[in-house]
Image (cartoon, helix red, strand yellow):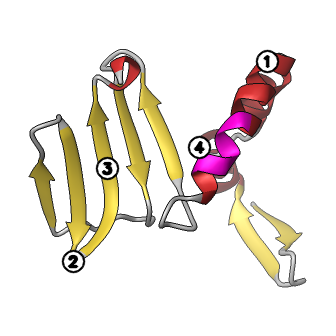
Amino acid sequence: MFEEVRSVNGVPIRLTEERWLHIVEARDERKGMAQIAEWESKDFARIIKAVPRLMEFPAKQLWIDYDAEADVLYLSFAKPQKATDSELRDDGIIVHRRGKKVVGLTIQDASTR
């Protein structure tokens, strides 16, 4: 059985219930929204304090992922990165490039920097 909805452009989209469940489970934004609701005013203040530095970045788009268990911060300047080369610097930062363009950074021991 197919379920039909309309896209933002009014185009009909028909998927089976199984496919809808897959999409909803894989991209459940409510989990992220719940985390935001638990933030305190000091968390927002820290983000606002970082804005001037973020505005100085050479990249206009930025995706951030942090692995607390490994203490590794991943910064992506393109999605997908499709890096063709990676270089480990002496300071423990891995620079990911596609051609000459830097598409991401992996920062090891992020919490101690």
C-alpha distance separating marks 2 and 3: 14 Å
Image x and y of residue 1, in percent:
75, 60
Q: Which sits earlier in the primary sequence, circle 4 or circle 3?
A: 4
* Residue 87 appears in the picture as rendered: yes
Q: Main secondary structure of the magenta part?
A: helix
The image quarter in which residue 37 lies:
top right
Amino acid at circle 2: Lys
Image x and y of residue 4, in percent:
84, 68
Amino acid at circle 4: Ala
6 versus 28 height, above or below: below
Question: Is 71 on the left or on the right of 22, as rendered?
Answer: left
95 versus 65 height, above or below: below
Please check the rendered image and state whether residue 7 is part of the magenta-colored stretch, yes or no: no
Instruction: Write down the residue under mark 1.
Output: 42
Image x and y of residue 108, in percent:
26, 30
* Residue 18 appears in the picture as rendered: no
Residue 101's tag is none
C-alpha distance separating marks 2 and 1: 39 Å
Q: Residue at x 57, y 68 (%)?
A: 60
Residue 105's tag is 3
Instruction: Write down the residue under mark 4.
Output: 26
**Which span of residues is magenta-colored?**
49-53
Mark 2 burial class by Cα count in 10 Å: few <14, some 14-19, many 20+: few
The image quarter in which residue 9 lies:
bottom right
Question: Is 82 on the left or on the right of 51, as rendered?
Answer: left
Q: CB under 8 Å between callouts 2 and 3?
A: no
C-alpha distance separating marks 1 and 3: 27 Å
Instruction: Write down the residue under mark 2.
Output: 100
